[in-house]
Image: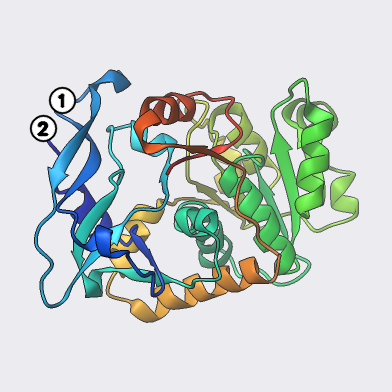
């Protein structure tokens, strides 16, 4: 199936960003085709993805021709071999969201992927005030790093769980430089617990789980009474095992979050959408939120980008330029 409508679906969900007042060259205005990554059948093999030339529709009175500067490739995209990877498109102007010109291309390309996910989870599930604590796993992921930085800007404390690895000390230093208060491996949490941490900071009311399995259980078991664990990923591909005592004696709440669904439900709420983008952009301008480390891949080398995204050890966010 040739997915010509993917871009319009992405625009509808609010994932296409137009840099504010970005002027196109005269040559670009006369281009009638674009390169696009498409697939004609579902497959676990990225070889089904091909780069093809697609025609661009004519620009109407209220349309905008958009030139793609950078597009993120996310693990979730690989679930259905989907995404918005094409060099251009023509869209209705009211379907686009502008990003201020002073935001970098890398920041603009990833703003709706990582920072907005972190922002929503920190604001929508618990009432957090300065001094409150958040616990998370996958802390070195792009979302995890955004959580650390936004939480620090809000005056929140973060407990960050990572998987043990050869360069663990280097990673801990990196996360602490972003504002992480505590960084521990899963093995450390299992062997020594977090009692010593809770002598210094309150038990967390909010836990963020992107791994599942045992790691998700570590987040859940360290929540305060009445706490909420939000699951937004399942990197371990293992189910959560929730003991009954977590519900009976600790009154925990389990929630799920998917930014795409949030955007679908709020696509008509321009006020809330703008408030979120303004807040995230202000953090970027103030140096409190940096774009993730990115592997910038030329469009014609898209197979490298797709393969890198499928590698679980890849620490860089993948962009097709």
Q: Earlier in the sequence, mark 1 or mark 2?
A: 2
Residue at screen point 45% across, 25% down: 310
Q: Is residue 228 above or below residue 47?
A: below
- Horizontally, residue 112 falls left or right of residue 171, namely left
Q: Are marks 1 and 2 in contact (CB under 8 Å)?
A: yes
- Horizontally, residue 144 falls left or right of residue 75, namely right
The answer to which of 245 and 68 lies nearer the viewer is 68
Category of crowding for the residue at label 1, using alpha-carbon neighbours closer than 10 angstroms: few (below 14), some (14–19), many (at least 20)? few
Residue at screen point 82% across, 26% down: 191
Category of crowding for the residue at label 2, using alpha-carbon neighbours closer than 10 angstroms: few (below 14), some (14–19), many (at least 20)? few
Q: How is the image coloured?
A: rainbow
Q: Is residue 224 visible?
A: no
- Horizontally, residue 78 falls left or right of residue 278, namely left
Q: Is residue 134 above or below residue 168?
A: below
Residue 316 is situated, as x and y percent measured from the top left of the image, at 58, 36
Q: Is residue 224 above or below residue 86?
A: below
Residue 156 is situated, as x and y percent measured from the top left of the image, at 74, 63
Residue 227, located in which quarter of the rendered image?
Answer: bottom right
Q: Which residue is mark 2?
A: 1
Judged from the image, the secondary structure of the residue bearing numbered disc 1 is loop
Residue 258 is situated, as x and y percent measured from the top left of the image, at 40, 51
Q: Which residue is mark 1?
A: 41
Give me the C-alpha separation between circle 1 and circle 2: 6 Å
């Amino acid at each position: 199936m040739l997915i010509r409508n993917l871009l319009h679906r992405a625009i509808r969900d609010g994932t296409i960003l137009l840099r504010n007042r970005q002027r196109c060259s005269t040559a670009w205005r006369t281009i009638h085709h674009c390169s696009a990554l498409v697939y004609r059948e579902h497959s676990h093999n990225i070889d089904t993805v091909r780069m093809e030339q697609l025609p661009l529709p004519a620009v109407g009175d209220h349309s905008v021709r958009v030139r793609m500067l950078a597009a993120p490739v996310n693990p979730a995209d690989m679930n259905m071999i989907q995404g918005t990877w094409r060099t251009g498109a023509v869209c209705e102007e009211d379907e686009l969201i502008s990003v201020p010109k002073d935001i970098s291309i890398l920041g603009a390309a990833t703003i709706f992927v990582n920072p907005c996910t972190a922002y929503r989870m920190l604001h929508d599930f618990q009432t957090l005030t300065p001094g409150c604590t958040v616990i998370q796993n996958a802390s070195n992921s792009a979302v995890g790093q955004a959580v650390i930085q936004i939480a620090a800007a809000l005056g929140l404390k973060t407990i960050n769980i990572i998987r043990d690895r050869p360069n663990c000390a280097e990673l801990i230093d990196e996360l602490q430089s972003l504002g992480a208060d505590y960084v521990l491996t899963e093995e450390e949490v299992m062997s020594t617990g977090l009692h010593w941490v809770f002598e210094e900071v309150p038990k967390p009311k909010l836990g963020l789980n992107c791994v599942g399995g045992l790691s998700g259980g570590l987040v859940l078991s360290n929540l305060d009474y009445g706490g909420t664990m939000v699951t937004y990923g399942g990197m371990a591909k293992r189910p959560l095992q929730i003991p009954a005592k977590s519900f009976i004696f600790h009154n925990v709440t389990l929630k799920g979050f998917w930014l795409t669904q949030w955007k679908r439900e709020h696509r008509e709420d321009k006020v809330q959408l703008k408030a979120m983008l303004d807040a995230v952009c202000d953090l970027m301008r103030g140096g409190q939120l940096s774009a993730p480390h990115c592997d910038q891949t030329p469009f014609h080398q898209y197979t490298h980008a797709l393969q890198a995204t499928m590698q679980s050890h890849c620490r860089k966010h993948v962009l097709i330029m």
